[in-house]
Image: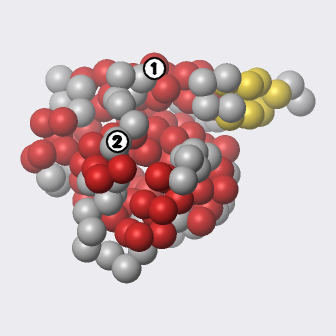
Amino acid sequence: MTKIVISASHVNLERRKTRGTGMEPSRVARKLLSAFKKVVRPSSSDWVTGLSWQDDDILHALTSGRRVNDSFIEDFRDCLPNFTLGAKLFVIPRYLIYVIRFPDRDVTDFLINELSRLVRDQSFLRAITTEQAHAIIAGLNFLEPHIRQNGSPMTYTNLSFALSALRKIR
């Protein structure tokens, strides 16, 4: 197997295609990174909402120089609702790349459920660009065959809902 390294995020992805998209995971990852490249890393006061008991741990990790990498995502896999809108725009592509690489981990359910919630939020829909919406769609399209076959019915329903809402963004 050939490994592809995307230097911008140090992401290793196997060279393979899935049915339904025809896209390699590295191409989806590049599309996500490109679409979100102008999103600035939040300042220390703009990472979390301050409404959850986990916020202090997240904030400590990120203000101590920790990157939003695989180990961060694994440690804070269920914390997407804790992030502010600006921080979500920073972390969503990273979480989505992680999920493309490891679709059987529970991060997948947490991410898709959060995206399904976010597409109901007008502030999120106003905040993302068409390019960003299309990149998220590419990531979700890549995951769709796997989720349909292996995921829970609720996750598949949420994925379908998120895709439908994001496709309306022009």
- Residue contact between numbered discs 1 and 2, judged by CB atoms under 8 Å: no
Q: Nearer the viewer, residue 7 or 16?
A: 7
Q: Secondary structure at mark 1?
A: helix
Question: Is 78 positioned to the left or the right of 114 in the image?
Answer: right
How much space separates mark 1 and mark 2, taking CA atoms?
18 Å
Instruction: Determine whether 45 is above or below 11 in the image.
Output: below
The answer to whether any part of residue 83 appears in the image is yes
Q: Nearer the viewer, residue 46 or 128?
A: 46
Mark 1 surroundings within 10 Å by alpha-carbon count, few (fewer than 14), some (14 through 19), many (20 or more) = some
Q: Secondary structure at mark 2?
A: loop
Q: Sequence-wise, which precedes: disc 1 or disc 2?
A: 1
Name the kind of residue labelled 2 in the image. Answer: Pro
**Pointer 2: what residue?**
42
Q: Position of residue 71 (x, y in %)?
A: 66, 56
**Pointer 1: what residue?**
34
- Asked where in the image residue 168 lies, by quadrant, the reply is top left
Q: Identify which residue is drawn at 29% across, 53% down.
A: 45
Q: Position of residue 101 (x, y in %)?
A: 66, 44
Quarter occupied by the C terminus: top left
Q: Identify which residue is drawn at 18% across, 36% down.
A: 127
Question: Is 53 positioned to the left or the right of 109 in the image?
Answer: left
How is colour applied across the structure in the image?
A: secondary structure
Instruction: Determine whether 106 is above or below 94 in the image.
Output: below
Q: Identify which residue is drawn at 76% across, 24% down.
A: 4
Q: Nearer the viewer, residue 82 or 131?
A: 82
Q: Identify which residue is drawn at 13% across, 36% down.
A: 126
